[in-house]
Amino acid sequence: MKKVCRELLATLKREKLVLDWREKQQAQAVVMQSIKLEMRRLPSPYSRGCVTKSLPVPMCMVFDHYSGDSAGAAAI
């Protein structure tokens, strides 16, 4: 699980968290879709229902901690 999360965060930082991404609905949707796709790579003990219910948690964490500027993305 940690591996998938680390890879997701690296991908988001590198490709998806553009400047002012939190203010653009389309950019937020791209980040949410990336999170969904990466969470599907979790090992079999994590059912699809569990992943669907817990999806807001990583999205809120990314939204709160990563503003899209280089300073915020490097903070965590």
Image (cartoon, rainbow, N blue to C red):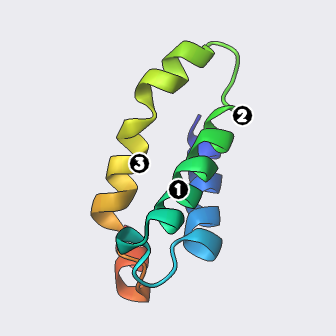
Dot placed on the residue nearer the N-terminal end, 2 or 3: 2
Give above or below for 30 relative to 33.
below
Q: How crowded is mark 1: few (under 14 residues within 10 Å), some or many (20 or more)?
A: few
Q: Mark 2 points at which residue?
A: 41
Q: Residue furthest front?
A: 25
Mark number for residue 29? Answer: 1
Q: Can residue 46 be seen in this view?
A: no
Give the Cα distance between marks 2 and 3.
16 Å
Q: Residue 7 carries which label?
A: none
The residue where tag 3 is placed is 59
Label 3 element class: helix
Q: How far from the left and from the top, in percent, is residue 50?
A: 50, 17
- Determine the residue positioned at 52% across, 50% down: 32
Q: Where in the figure is residue 36, as x and y percent of width and height?
A: 60, 40
Which residue is more in the foreground, 9 or 35? 35
Gap in angstroms between the C-alphas marked 3 and 1? 10 Å
